[in-house]
Amino acid sequence: MLPLGSVCPLGVRMLGVHSRVPVVTCVRGITYGENDAVNPNFVNRNPRNMEMLRLARKPEGWNLEASSRTYWYKLVLEKSNRHSTGWVEHHTGTAVVSASTREWAIKQHLYSTTDTNAVYNIGCILARRCLESGISEVYTELDQYAESSGKIQKFLSAMKEGGVELKEPHFIHELSVGMFSRRRPALPWQVQEEGISSAPSPVS
């Protein structure tokens, strides 16, 4: 503990015992090392940061494509003759989180690896792994097949019960905020939810 009013080797003077805010003072004759210098290049080690701020771009794709590509994370379910697998796919094509009946930790607790109960448990496990990975909202095209397939309906209900929202928010597009918004950056704390259009007009 430094005495009150003294200056530490890094040039920080403490206000008092109960004060937690240090005051930086300029002290002559102190040379700083490499660890004390501020790096001008900031590297974002959290790729989810821009997506959670709704500033990350979504690939818009083409208007006539059957399967939409405007998403960050897409929920996929695959059923074969022997196993059931569900995973969350990034728009770059890589699988981020997955759960399958091929895993022995899941397979040993199931009576069958292809029935409705297996698909439901895969959805519960995948939802928990998504939340542990920081993914709480995903895009899916399985809802259009839920009425004709009971397994898909159970899978989607398990994801909802697990706390995963099956709809991604729209990203903040410059064209959807205002006509003069190209001149200034889009900031998430200055944009209202009702002011964001669902489908921004393409740039010609």
Image (cartoon, helix red, strand yellow):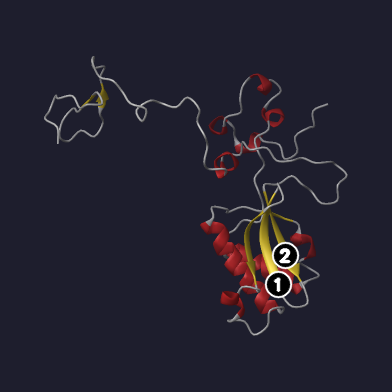
The residue closer to the viewer here, 20 or 46, is 46
Q: Position of residue 82 (x, y in %)?
A: 74, 78
**Mark 1 sits on what residue?**
84
In the image, taking residue 78 as reference, residue 9 lies left or right, namely: left
Q: Quick check: marks 1 and 2 in contact, CB under 8 Å?
A: yes
Residue 44 drawn above or below residue 27:
below
In the image, taking residue 87 as reference, residue 67 lies left or right, namely: right
Residue 93 drawn above or below residue 172:
below
Viewport quadrant of the C terminus: top right
Question: How much space separates mark 1 and mark 2, taking CA atoms?
Answer: 8 Å
Name the residue furthest left: 3
Where disc 2 sits, the SS reads strand
**Mark 2 sits on what residue?**
77
Residue 105 drawn above or below residue 66:
below
Mark 2 is on which residue type? Leu
Mark with earlier residue (1, 2): 2
**Quarter-of-image position of residue 10:** top left
**Quarter-of-image position of residue 53:** top right
Mark 1 is on which residue type? Ser
